[in-house]
Amino acid sequence: MDKKKVLEQLNLNLEHEMAAIVRYLHHSFIVTGPTRGPLLSMFRTQAQDSMQHAIQLGEKIVALGGHPSVKIQEIYEPGEQTIEEMLEEDLEMEKHHLEMYEKQLSLVQDNTALKLMLEQIIVEETAHVEQLEMYLGPRRALKV
């Protein structure tokens, strides 16, 4: 395992998860309308899930002898958004995270614990993608 490369990738993941926390919290603040209650709950749960991923990543970075990044990936803030635009933005972000984690599996094949941690995060990110696709309706869930 190339520890330096793995640490770089884990820190990149950490930065993306930190950005996801901010994005989901922001969406929970600005969502309005009759569906605000369930969406607010979903956005805040997603923020908490991202925080748990960030904690796992930060702890693993330190366990591998690295230093966790305090950077946050840049977040595009378009201003006013419809609920569908918020959900679409979150879906694209979750798909990106899923791709990142899946690509990184090849870097950690000889570290069972790290591989299993990434696989568990992949399971959770997949659930996030599926949940967002269901919020957006059947036409979106069918797109691959």
Image: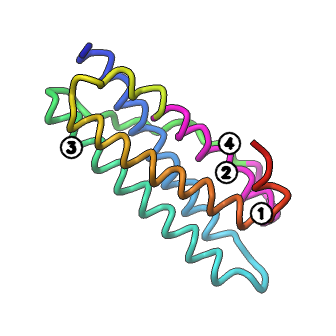
Which residue is at 50% across, 32% downward? 100
Which element carries disc 1, helix, strand or loop?
helix
Residue beneath label 3, please? 59
Q: Nearer the viewer, residue 108 or 67?
A: 108
Counting from the top left corner in percent of width and height, residue 90 is at 65, 52
Disc 1 residue type (three-letter): Leu
Quadrant containing the C terminus is top right
For mark 1, does the 10 Å Cα neighbourhood hold few (<14), some (14 to 19), or many (20 or more) residues?
A: some
Residue beneath label 4, please? 76
Residue beneath label 1, please? 136
Q: Is residue 114 left or right of residue 52?
A: left
Residue 91's tag is 2
Which element carries disc 3, helix, strand or loop?
helix
Start-end of magenta stretch: 78-101
Distance Cα–Cα, label 2 vs label 4: 14 Å
Which residue is at 62% across, 70% downward? 29
- Place residue 109 in its image quadrant: top left
Disc 4 residue type (three-letter): Tyr
Q: Earlier in the sequence, mark 2 or mark 4?
A: 4
Disc 2 residue type (three-letter): Leu
* Residue 120 magenta-highlighted: no
Distance Cα–Cα, label 3 vs label 1: 34 Å
Q: Determine whether label 3 and label 1 are within 8 Å by CB.
A: no
Q: Earlier in the sequence, mark 1 or mark 4?
A: 4
For mark 2, does the 10 Å Cα neighbourhood hold few (<14), some (14 to 19), or many (20 or more) residues?
A: some
Counting from the top left corner in percent of width and height, residue 119 is at 37, 42
- Place residue 14 in its image quadrant: top left
Distance Cα–Cα, label 4 vs label 3: 28 Å
